[in-house]
Image: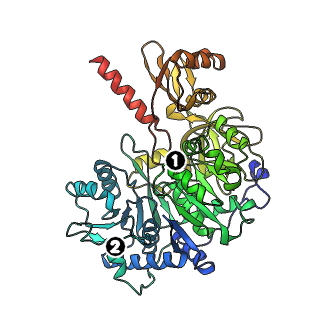
Amino acid sequence: MEIKPWHRHYDYNVPTTIRYPHLAAHELLNIPVAHYPEKAALIFYGSEMTFLELRTEATKFANALSGLGVQKGDRVGIHLPNCPQYLVCYFAVLSIGAVVVNLNPLYTPDELKTMIGISGLETLVTFDMAIPSIRVLCGQIIIPRVIVTAMTDYVMGAPVSSAKSLELEKNWHHFGELVRKYPNPRRSRTHVEPKDPAMLQFTGGTTGIPKAAILTHANVVAATFQAALWGSATMHLTPPEKRNVMAVLPYFHIYGNIVVMNWSIFQCATQIQVPRFNIDEMVELLDKIEQITFFPTVPTLITALINHPKAEELKLDKKLMMLNSGGAPMPMELIEHVRDMGIYFSEGYGLSESTSLGISNPILGLKKVGSIGIPFPDNDVRLVDVENGTVDVPDGEPGEIIMKGPLIMQGYWNNPEETKGQLRDGWLHTGDIAIRDEDGYIFIVDRKKDMIIAGGFNIYPRDIDEVLFQHPKVAEVVSLGVKDEYRGETVKAFIVLKPGQKCTEEEIINFCKEKLVAYKVPKLIEFRDSIPKSAVGKILRKILREEEEAKLKEKQK
């Protein structure tokens, strides 16, 4: 492995390259089963499932899937929130060589129809609360195998559901009843290679046609090892018997799948499962837990947590051993607030196409406020000219992040054109613009497609957002370019105020005038109760852009 300039900033025991075992992803589950079979793999509404029980249930469900005719290479949709059944299904699907298709449980029938059409899945595992949507979906397309579970079926003391109690369609299957058919399950004999597809991870899709990134077993294993070894500088100080992780990031999102679920399996850590995010419920849950070893999350959740009226009572500096942020850039003001509270913190960067990882700040070593850090082991990163995509830019100049290494997807499922556009000579072109400083630390400037061109000036929305986050009345903000006859585009800021605060457009604009060059100052301000976000908490500029385009069309009528 070639020595890279950023290697000098790695923590003392993080390797510059990793010898990845020749493993299929589901075989990672054998590690905690062998060493801590009776330890809780997960806690769901107070009920525990041990690592051994998890593997046994997964083996039973694998037998059931094979019994229904699911074969190697078939796609199986997992349409579940964070719950025990997700892990059971995930490990079962992978063990028979089938491919997991991650589906957001909040998707509408139309969204599901599109994704089922793209992936060609013939088996869908869903849950009781989604039954009405799935009935509508099945009226539009044929899904040969629909398997339904009740969210409470693995909660001690709750009634166990059945096909009859859920009033399932005659040709549908009940998850628990399938599992109970195999009291003495047999390990799958299907040969699965690291190069085989493990997951189809949808990316984009808020507008236009979504793409499904093909992630192999080797991708998942490499990402799990990289995430675990990156945090090894301090993780060994907590014995495996005591390790846990807050599983609030959804497993169907690649960040939650790798950095919560697969990380915890490899680290023998207990997952405290949270099926949906509600800040008051989260605070109540945290109040009952003595200590959290690892809390991977996103900026919007961190904002909600540290601004909660009971935040001080929780003594988060004692409770949270490591807080990690990803999914979206964290505003500098928020980073400083977290540090002021005494919480150990790191921030990283990755995409679905890079199996969640790519770049991160060292755990112990040099961290720079506002930087996403340095590349992970075995991940080569370049910043190239935005226009030609091949020439490296000098330090301090903005360029597009491109990455190459064992994390990078095979391509997009049945989409050679998009694959060709994103993967060139093994390099993933991310569409994210960043600068690199003299120490090799990378700072995100913005998304290439989010850049605003106003009056000939290139404006990165993040510059404006960073300033607005400094305003004492502002809780959330997102700025974007809207069409303007004179300037081509002009800057509009969407703002959510902190509870109980009042503010005027003029106040915001004057605040920006003091801190920004004139062409970057927002000309339009819109106060909102909320800003649209993805399931993982990422702000959706696309939705706001669509709304603005619709308003413009209405005006032109």
The spot of residue 344 in percent (x, y) is 71, 50
**Disc 1 marks which residue?**
279
Q: Is residue 426 visible?
A: no
Specify whether 174 is left or right of 187.
Answer: left
Identify which residue, 84 or 316, lies in the foreground.
316
**Disc 2 marks which residue?**
70
Report the residue at 26% width, 69% height from top.
Answer: 165
Question: In which quarter of the view is residue 147 placed?
Answer: bottom left
Say what amino acid the circle numbered 2 marks. Val
Specify whether 330 is left or right of 6.
Answer: left
Identify which residue, 177 or 419, lies in the foreground.
177
Q: Residues within 10 Å of mark 2 (few under 14, many from 20)?
A: many
Q: Secondary structure at mark 1?
A: helix
- The structure's colour scheme is rainbow
Say what amino acid the circle numbered 1 marks. Ile
**Measured Cα–Cα span from mark 1 to mark 2:** 39 Å
Report the residue at 66% width, 49% height from top.
Answer: 360
**Picture layout, residue 454 above or below residue 314:** above
Is tag 1's residue or tag 2's residue first in the polypeptide sequence? 2
Identify which residue, 394 or 433, lies in the foreground.
433
The spot of residue 130 in percent (x, y) is 31, 57
Q: Secondary structure at mark 2?
A: loop
The quarter of the picture where the N terminus appears is bottom right
The spot of residue 44 in percent (x, y) is 49, 65
Specify whether 7 is left or right of 495.
Answer: right
Mark toward the viewer: 1 or 2: 1
